[in-house]
Amino acid sequence: MEGAAGPGHAEGAGKAGSRKVGNRAGSRTDGLPLTAPSTLLLGAGLAASVAWYDDAGRWGLVLAGWLAAIVGLLGLAWAADRRAAPAAARRYPWTRAEAVVFLALLAAAAALRAYELAEIPYRLHNDEMSCGIEAARFLSEPRPSLFGTGWFDCPNLGFFLTSLPMLLAGPTIEALRSSAVVLGLMSLAGAYVLVRQAAGVPTALVLLALNAADPWSVHLGRTGFHYVQATAAAMLALALFLGALGSGRRLPAAGAGVVLGVGLQTYYAAWLVPFGVLALALLWGAAAGRPAWRGAGRAVLLAAAGAVVATAPLVRHYARNPGLLGLRSAEVVVFGPLSREHVLAAVGSDSPAAIAAHQAERVASLFVGGGDTSEQFGFDGPFVPRWLWPPYVAGLLLACARALRTRPGAEPGERAGTAFLLAWIAMTLVAGGILTIDPPFSPRLCVMAPVLLFPAALALAWAWGESRRLGAAPRATATGLLAAFLLLLGWWNARDYFAGFGAKAAGVRRDGIARLVARHPSVGGVLNLFPQPELHWHEAYGFLAPGRTFREVSAGDGLATLETAPEGGGAWLVVAPPGTRFAPADRGSLLASGERRPPRGGEARETFDYWVVQPRGGP
């Protein structure tokens, strides 16, 4: 971290914090050769993707047109930058030490997200499996409309992103969750760049170290829900937009809009990002003064253009199906008519003041209470570890002081960026927490996950930076103590997730059965001997065991079903309670031909015995 100055340090160095872009100022002819083809790509691609967005026969053409329109817009923005070529743009160059630490932390984060990916969490939540089912639809013809809507009226583009690893590995748990690993790492990298611009390199590195093993961040980055898509889009869009404000360049502003537009087609939490972009522009203008307002306004317009191009086909879909827009959001808004009875049962009053107080109290439990209310995560501890409470409070005070700093020469990026990070956490807690039912429901808060610990990172980095005033030896000691603290906290968090939370998230019998069918491609049917009825329609079966035959019989009634093959052919998977006793004929004939394998210990709360049995007769 030594030698890697943050925004405040660069400003104090005067012209050392700036550089010349190119050897000369841009001319009106620079970038012109790119303008015509970019305009053609933008127009033709936009027309094709909007006109044929739901035409299954032109699916590939729609995708190509959509990508061409995006490339065309970015090409126009780049050409405009070439013509303008700002004489000076801030740049905080990467040092070799920073790059090494950054890559090492990102590698550690990747290892924690890839470890036992298919097994932890063992539970197969119905929402995760629904994402898998929707993604698997893109693996066969006819593919669904790329810009239509699917499960719970969520846009299909997010499910298409989930399907990309399945093109190589098929519809497996590993493939479903591997897309989350990639997007989770992208969200950490985006948050790093965002915080690096706002508060400097040391704070960004400390935050990345905290996030590498943070249970919430780890869970988002290793489960097949589409929430992490919104998280990654939010962090990347905001990082690009802050970079556009600082440099005056058009390309990152347009890129921020494109990423924002893609994010709007994933999980609903990303709908907060446009408001974040506006808030960041306003804070930047307020911090930089009147001359900056024009540049901030231009950046907002370019971001809006990028979002329009990225969402244009989906907008046409909503125009043809207006009832789908906002339907799910209306069901979870706390003051909405569709949730009135639910809120009344939870609060015991329909008074707005009582509801707001109840909601705020529940959101506060995210920090100091029992944690999450969702089954998708269900973490029962505070989302800010208790070890971080002192630096978190100190960081909040320090961030407020930096955001309000008005001394001459105060770096606007530091003021606006720090104020925005605090505002972003607050905006998310209000929009995704206080204003929605059953808070704190972590999926609705996912867009703040990579920056939730920013105040703690700011305080720890500030304390480390202050140690330089005491000399080399004290600074080396402070560096060692900080590294030891981060390693200890990372070990504790990883242990808390994989040993503590992982054990609590053990699957039920259904999860084990679905996994077994996926491991045995020869199985064409399941014969369930448990007395309790099974939910054969559950999404876990729909994703991992599609088209299989499911039957329930009593062990005492015999296993005559095994004489015939399942409807689709193949073997039977016989599932029975541990220690089930069978008639001698059954045990000696059919079950003897099967392979008995009790599940490994700890896999599921409900254990069972099973056999893979080849039927004697035909269908």
Image (tube, grey):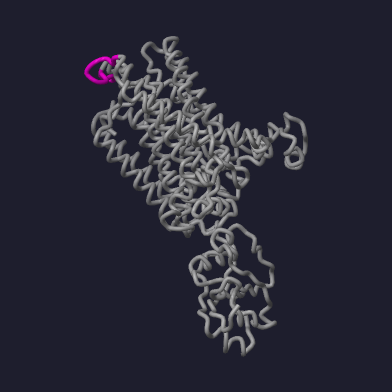
Foreground: 149 or 233? Answer: 149
Foreground: 489 or 437? Answer: 437
What residue do we see at 56% from left, 61% from top? 507
Which quadrant, please, contains the C terminus? bottom right
For residue 361, say whether it is visible: no
Is residue 82 found left or right of 39 in the rendered image?
left
Is residue 136 found left or right of 335 in the rendered image?
left
- Magenta-drawn stretch contains 345: no
Identify the magenta region: 16-27
User: Where does residue 211 sit, x and y in percent of width and height?
Assistant: 43, 42
Which quadrant, please, contains the N terminus? top left
Q: Is residue 346 above or below residue 140?
A: above
For residue 272, say whether it is visible: yes
Q: Is residue 204 above or below residue 577?
A: above
User: Where does residue 205 sit, x and y in percent of width and height?
Assistant: 35, 36
Foreground: 380 or 390? Answer: 380
Foreground: 264 or 203? Answer: 264
User: Where does residue 394 sit, x and y in percent of width and height?
Assistant: 46, 30
